[in-house]
Image (cartoon, rainbow, N blue to C red):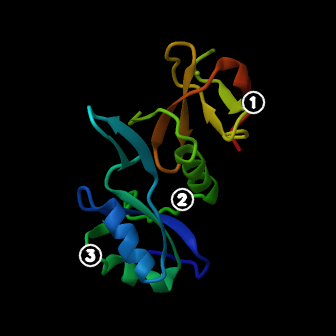
Amino acid sequence: MIKTKEKRWYAVYTKYKSEKLVAEHLQAKNIEAFTPLLKKVKRYQKKTKTHFYPLINNYTFVKINEKERKKVLETKNVLGFLKIGSDLPHIPKEEINTLKRVVGENLEIDLFNSPDKIGEEVEIIQGALTGMKGQLVSVFNKSEFIIQLKQLGVHLKIGVHPRYLRKTLSIE
């Protein structure tokens, strides 16, 4: 249950392939909603098409207070809120901002369910993702590392040149 009158971000579980539609329905109800979408361009023999795919399948994020919770649950194709046990955790604003920055970068991104030395805390020091921090979980081709969004339990593999990374003391 939402215990604050202050608006916070929450993850909403949606029906399969309904993330964009749910976000539109919520926005029509004047509820701030965000679905991180990746842009993919497909080239065919005679044409090029641009498609947008959800970064995280079956989830849309909403910024709500206690009064708006029921409106969200009554929205078509919403199955419920992401819960951990009986708790309804809010998503830190910083993680939502990270998702917004990542999908705005047009990077090649792969989503994982589970960067020099494994376990080190790193920070991106150049480009639009400057300041983004994460834990180095593994290295792919010496130019990709994994950013962990702790509250969501999601890892993103992002291609970044090693010279744009530096060790940090801890994740803030």
Quadrant in which residue 58 is drawn: bottom left
Location of mark 1 (residue): 168
Is 10 above or below relative to 41?
A: below
Give how far apart the Cα atoms at labels 2 and 1 are: 23 Å
For residue 85, side relative to residue 134 (left or right): left
Q: 36 or 68, which lies in front?
A: 36
Q: Which residue is mark 2?
A: 91
Amino acid at the residue labelled 1: Thr
Query: Looking at the image, is mark 3 or mark 2 earlier in the sequence?
Result: 3
* Element on which disc 2 rests: loop
Front: mark 3 or 1: 3
Which percent across, then down, holds residue 67?
Answer: 48, 86
Dot label at residue 76: 3
Instruction: Residue at 74%, 25% (x, y): give it.
Output: 166
Observer able to see residue 24: yes
Report the amino acid beneath label 3.
Lys
Secondary element under disc 1, as helix, strand or loop, is loop
Residue at figure coordinates x 31%, y 40% from the top left: 47
Q: Amino acid at mark 2?
A: Ile
| Distance CA(mark 3)–CA(mark 2) | 22 Å
- The answer to whether 114 appears left or right of 66 in the picture is left
